[in-house]
Amino acid sequence: MPGRRASGLGLGPHIEAVVVSCEQDLLGAVTVLFRRFDPDIVVGWDVQGGSVGYLLQRSAILDAAAARSSDAAAAANPSFSTNNSSGSSGSGGALLRLLSRAPRLDADPRNGRDSYGDDHASGLWLWGRTVLNLWRVLRSELKLQSYAQPAVAARVLRRRLAAYPHAALAEWYTGPARGAVLSHVLERARVNLDLLGRLGLVQRTAEMARLFGISFFDVLRCVTSANARVFFCMYCHRKTLLSFFWRQVARQAAMECIPLVMEPRSKFYADPVVVLDFQSLYPSMVIAYNLCFSTIMGRLDLSDAGHTTTDRAGVDPAGTSPPSSEGTSEGGPYVSPNGAVFCSTDQRVGVLPRMLRELLETRIMVKGAMKRARDRGERVLERTLDARQFALKMISNVTYGYTAAGYSGRMPMAELADAIVECGRATLEAAIRMVESHPPWGARVVYGDTDSLFVLLEGRSTEEAFRVGKEIAAAVTRSNPPAVVLKLEKVYTSSLLVSKKRYVGHSIEDPRPPYNPRLDAKGIELVRRDQCPFVNKMQEKCIRVLFTTRDLSAVKAYCIRQWTRALAGRAGIQDFIFQKEVKLGTYASETYMPLAAIVATKRMVRDPASKPKRGERVPYVVVHGPPGARLMDLVVGPEALVGEGAQGGAGVPRVNAQYYISKVALPALDRLLSLAGVDVKRWYAEMPRPRHRSMSAFIAVGLASTAAVLQPQVALSRLAAAERAQAHTAALCAHCTGHPTQGLRCQALDCAVLFERREADIEATAARELCCDLKLM
């Protein structure tokens, strides 16, 4: 390996560092390392912009520069030969040949990548290796507002990571703090491995690949993976090979059926609402009614009441009498609600039903083995079995999608997909009729969604709700084929049904008292990542107070307190940060783009290397501006409020609290609290407006007026308090980073201490200026 061994950098006793003299030798050292360890999996947080992608880009540039130098030398001296060169210039080409599928990467960033890689994977293909672009992989594993490495580490590992500007790292690397830079990079690499281990990503993916018989990388691919999983499972259960030609798929009719999603009876429910859920509804429909490619016999044409024919799909065996359109006759074919005819299990058991039944039974068996492994304390075996049962669950859930994937699927069939949906819809409708036609229950269905029922039990206690819910589940289960099971999932002691797919409730899953309800929400701003924490927190607290106390005056008092804090500037800056995805190059206009894209474009003007990756969530804040300013001119990145230039306080943008309250928070709160008879906008209109706490206002009015308002001892006490807060936040950052100076350069936007430190710095600077103006310093 070129270079020399290095020591004394403070990297630990087990870390080997090699010092090289130039960038070409560095690429050669990386090439030697790859050949030495020959890794099967290459992991990087941002493989495209950093890590291996950056190395390949530099390798291509150096290789091209060396080629141009050789051509120029050969033109100047015909006797010049490339064999006369030192040989170090070939290190870049060696790395390219070792790693990249393409023999060479040009300046065009699209070369060597594909559109799927830009959206989901690494965008790089390495010979014989799997590349994990970790931040993109974690997008499908975790639901976070920010996928920056410090934010993910804080959520998953409960560990704080420092985030330094590139300029600061470059400055430290050229000075005596080089060891700190290397330690920082090494910690980032360790965090990648810790995240893989904590989430069990490699183990779970390997178990899926082993179970389905597909490659490791194919498991990580979304649509292709789902189709491949079902196809290989069907292949293992086949009697004859099933396949469609693309011309057959093109001639199929469009799908006509959709799941049943009722319009809820929107209101605030103070009585218990029982939530019942069909266990694996679509797989159970396939098993119960023998729905499969291999069992479909055709489709009834009921347009003419006097004739019954079959067309489009399947076969009509000679001598088979037309089935009844009411369902399954004894031992005869089954007619699904959409008119598709399927033979009975006496004639043929379908491939899909047999496959799904074995998958579900195997999952039950694996979960039992996992419980026994947990009891014995075998953690490794337990995690392996958990990965297997999760893989079995995923394959059963995507089977319907395989039959309905008309664009990306290998074998879609519209009649089969419609039959599965219509059977599930008919089952749900039959359950609704049964619930509402049984007077002893006194139940009323207020909402239904695909495979779940929300049943209101007016005037009942929580204990009675669990009892009636179990009776309903048992009765509906008995009225359906054995494979169809309705289960009592939870009971909402209080709930708000807003609209389709949007509701929230106080959920209890364990029927044994004492009850410990938790907040269960879907579709509202509380669980949406495109909202700022200011709205999320306010909505969550209002709902909790409403569900717990049933006192609207307590909700009003909380809202007024939060609005007052925001208008007075006492709320944390981190609560006003939006995080939204950006896909530059896909917008119709470069002027009128989403606000996050505008902020990303402004940042690229200052630093072209800061271009966001496709689908990356870009943070931004709405600040105050001149009267009549457009919203697109009032958005800035959070670094403008907490960057190094913001410490002095002069010219620092101020969060536009009026915008956040009137345009974001009030509509979100009104959608929920209006169901309880509350006019939230009136609350805000009638509340007194506070004065902003910024001390710069006192400085702006001049020495005479400030002296009349603030006594000298008050100014000194504020200065002392500001300096104590400044020292406290600096100590917290120094403890996290291990060095006082490094802590002050950290810009981890997910850390609340960062914003507290910047606010303390601004407050201390303003207090010092005020004391100087009062001649107290």
Image: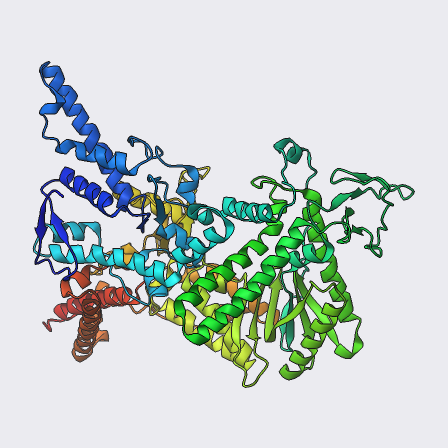
Q: Quadrant of residue 382?
A: bottom left
Q: Residue furthest front?
A: 239
Say if residue 571 shows up in the picture.
yes
Q: Is residue 652 above or below residue 489?
A: above
Name the residue nearer the viewer: 543 or 693. 543
Q: How many marks?
A: 0
Q: Quadrant of residue 298?
A: top right
Who's the residue at 29% across and 48% down the image? Answer: 39
Q: Is residue 486 left or right of residue 369?
A: right
Q: Is residue 316 above or below residue 625?
A: above
Who's the residue at 22% across and 34% down the image? Answer: 94
Name the residue nearer the viewer: 213 or 113. 213
Q: Is residue 746 left or right of residue 304?
A: left
Who's the residue at 65% across and 70% down the image? Answer: 487
Say if residue 152 shows up in the picture.
no
Image spot of residue 34 (x, y percent): 24, 44
Q: Residue furthest top?
A: 78
Name the residue nearer the viewer: 466 or 718. 466
In the rendered image, the quadrant that contains the C terminus is: bottom left
In the rendered image, the quadrant that contains the N terminus is: top left
Name the residue nearer the viewer: 711 or 281. 281
Q: Residue furthest right?
A: 306
Q: Is residue 31 left or right of residue 290?
A: left
Image spot of residue 402 (x, y percent): 60, 47
Image spot of residue 227 (x, y percent): 55, 45
